[in-house]
Amino acid sequence: MNKQGYYGQWGGAFIPEVLYETFRELGRAFAEVRHDPDFWNEYVQLMASYSCRPTPLTYAANLSDHFGGARIYIKREDLNHTGAHKANNVMGQGLLVRRMGKKRVIAETGAGQHGVATATMAAKFGLECTIYMGEDDVLRQRPNVFWMEKMGATVIPVTSGSRTLKDAINEAFRDWVTSMDDTHYVFGTVCGPHPFPEMVAWFQSIIGLEARRQILAAHGRLPARVFACVGGGSNAMGIFQGFLDDPGVELIGVEAGGHGVDTGQHAARLAGGDGSAGVAQGYKTMFLQNSDGQMRDTHSVAAGLDYVGVSPILSDLWEKERVRFTAATDREVMAALELTMRREGIIPALESAHAFVQAFKEAPAMERDEALIINMSGRGDKDIFTIADAFDDPSWKQFIINKGRAYAAD
């Protein structure tokens, strides 16, 4: 990254003049803590005492035997406090907010996990909290909305646009323009204007630092491949950073294939061939947009993966061919979820299950002495109603059963 917040041609800070001083203040504050080992140590200790870190690296013996190829390890961010990787970034930003003396936080959320994590942080640090969430996501993630409200956050359903994550981000920025003196925007992923991508990636790097130590202890050498789902990209960047400097470790990001990348009903910005360079929401990256630069509607069974853009850091790594991108369809995700539950007694979030899909496709062809890591970015509690509906649909259910049986032969 250069000093202007660019990763190759991607990134930057395309912001209204009214927010310029706020971003300068945030940039200065982050630069101070970024190079302060005492701050990082405080952060690590907070995550150890409050959020159960380090999260374990679980050897999935039954899945490994089922596929007969690589040894499958699962990085268990589902066991992080609030049930996902989101707490890593949020608690780090909470410490930063305390240093800056702000009294209120706002956030956007799609799947709701970032909202829950932000509400948790606000309760711990005694901050006022407002969460913006697309109306569609409020309906399909009701358990998370319930917990946000019970922890004292105000949840505002966004009814404009597609009523999903991109619209929640727009509303949060509108709030910040009118409240920046006492409010910090706890951005949830490695997107947005500089310094948000760098800052969120830094806090999430705790995942990769742990995973690297853990796989060396458990397997004796580095993994051959690391898989992570990609919405905005924070969980993927979190684990990828542990292995970016190891050319022998292949990094695979899995986007939302929705109903299929050939249907237009998906969120595959890099894997689907539909993405194009653009500037929106304060930064330059690959977006799903039409020829006039208007953002297209997206679809995913996973509320956290239907974002119209992707991290500028990941766009750069994709362009440099350091990260390979694929897409998983909704039905493939449900089949991988069922297989993981039945074989290991582990319930991935629908977002995380996208990474399982691709790992299951590739594991059988790998050598038995090779290892792969799946970053399980969250647990599936929040998805119980969506999962139940899928299993109640006869056509979906039959596909799930058939695909589960066929995985080993794929």
Image (cartoon, grey):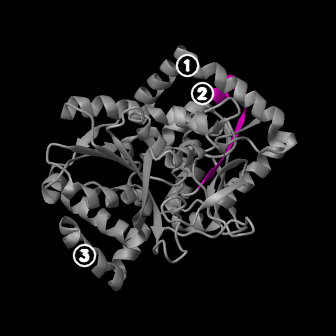
- Magenta span includes 43: no
The numbered dot on residue 47 is: none
- Mark 3 or mark 1: whose residue is earlier in sequence: 1
As helix, strand or loop, the secondary structure at mark 1 comes to: helix
Q: If the image is split into quadrants, where does the C terminus sit?
A: bottom left
Q: Depth check: give the residue in front, 221 or 62.
A: 221
Residue matched to label 3: 401
Q: Position of residue 312 (x, y in %)?
A: 60, 46
- Magenta span includes 106: yes
Q: Position of residue 226 (x, y in %)?
A: 34, 45
Could you tell me which residue is drawn at 60 percent across and 68 percent down?
A: 136
Q: Is residue 267 visible?
A: yes
As helix, strand or loop, the secondary structure at mark 3 comes to: helix
Q: Are marks 1 and 2 in contact (CB under 8 Å)?
A: yes
Q: Position of residue 79 (x, y in %)?
A: 36, 43
- Mark 3 or mark 2: whose residue is earlier in sequence: 2
Q: Residue furthest bottom?
A: 394
Q: What is the crowding at mark 2: few (fewer than 14 residues within 10 Å), some, or many (at least 20)?
A: some
Read off the magenta span: 96-109
Disc 2 residue type?
Leu
Could you tell me which residue is drawn at 65 percent across and 19 percent down?
A: 32
The numbered dot on residue 39 is: 1
Q: Depth check: give the residue in front, 346 or 37.
A: 37
Residue matched to label 2: 95
* Mark 3–mark 2 distance (CA, rounded to whole Å): 46 Å
Q: If the image is split into quadrants, where does the N terminus sit?
A: top right
Q: Depth check: give the residue in front, 393 or 402.
A: 402
Q: What is the crowding at mark 1: few (fewer than 14 residues within 10 Å), some, or many (at least 20)?
A: some
